[in-house]
Amino acid sequence: MRGQRVFTHLWMAWERVFAWMARLHPLRPGERHMFFIARRRYLGHPFVVDGVEVRRFDPVLELHMNNEILMEGLREGGPLFGVIVKLLQEAKRSLPVLAERAMDEEFRDVRVLYGVTFIHRGVERMGFTSFPIRNRLLCRLTTWYLHQLLRIVNPHADELLATHADAFVPKVVAISKARLVQMYGAEGRRAPVPAPDHVSP
């Protein structure tokens, strides 16, 4: 157990270094939320979400999971479904803050937010849409990273990976800024939200 704790601390130290190198920012300084964000120029395959087309080099808001919260969730015992539900609840609690942050002047020209995660089951009910990662190398690297993270924090990782392999396949999740603000902004939370449009990679 001591070795596992040491390895966990080393992993989290690396996460902080990566966050600095990748210029990731918290939603609010001094607060803990499920997401970190970074303004990027999109470099992947074009896609359409909520009627908004994202092309190469378009400005986007990239979402990164808070791996400290992720590790805490994966460390817990119990059914995998319950773990995923708790992580989705954590994410949903952060969405009003994300909507507020997305309206900042620095993101004025951003029309879409997206990220890569394995927590994609049920995201449609939160307004997001998921679709497969088309870049095979990125998919393999992300899957490998997730498996290593699970092995660090959960002694039953190999058993989980053997019985629930499909649950640990990452996907792209995306939402338009307009829809995010409509659903989770101060005004949007008081109004009904229509069903999302079809998303195609």
Image: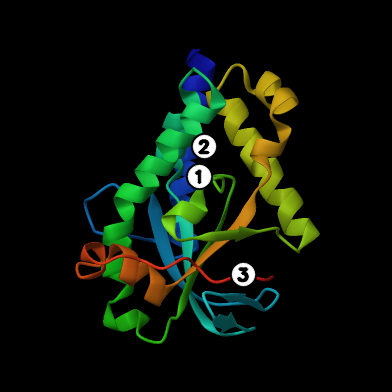
**Whether residue 59 can be seen here:** yes
Instruction: Measure the C-alpha gap from mark 2 to mark 1.
Output: 5 Å
Circle 2/circle 1 CB separation < 8 Å: yes
Residue 15, x across and y down, in percent:
48, 46
Instruction: Measure the C-alpha gap from mark 1 to mark 3.
Output: 34 Å
Q: Residues within 10 Å of mark 2 (few under 14, many from 20)?
A: some
Secondary structure under tag 1 reads helix
Residue 55, x across and y down, in percent:
63, 84
Residue at figure coordinates x 75%, y 63% from the top left: 134
Residue 114, x across and y down, in percent:
52, 65
**Residue that mark 3 sits on:** 199
Seen from the viewer's position, the closer of residues 140 and 125 is 125
Q: Residue furthest right?
A: 136
Instruction: Measure the C-alpha gap from mark 2 to mark 3.
Output: 35 Å
Q: Of callouts 2 and 3, which one flags the residue occurring earlier in the amino acid sequence?
A: 2
Residue 29, x across and y down, in percent:
23, 57
Decide: is 97 above or below 122: below
Secondary structure under tag 3 reads loop
The three-letter code of the residue at mark 3 reads Val
Which label was assigned to residue 11? 2
Q: Of callouts 1 and 3, which one flags the residue occurring earlier in the amino acid sequence?
A: 1
Q: Is residue 189 left or right of residue 179?
A: left
**Residue that mark 1 sits on:** 14
**Whether residue 24 can be seen here:** no
Q: Residues within 10 Å of mark 1 (few under 14, many from 20)?
A: few
The C terminus is located in which quarter? bottom right
The three-letter code of the residue at mark 1 reads Trp
Q: Residues within 10 Å of mark 3 (few under 14, many from 20)?
A: some
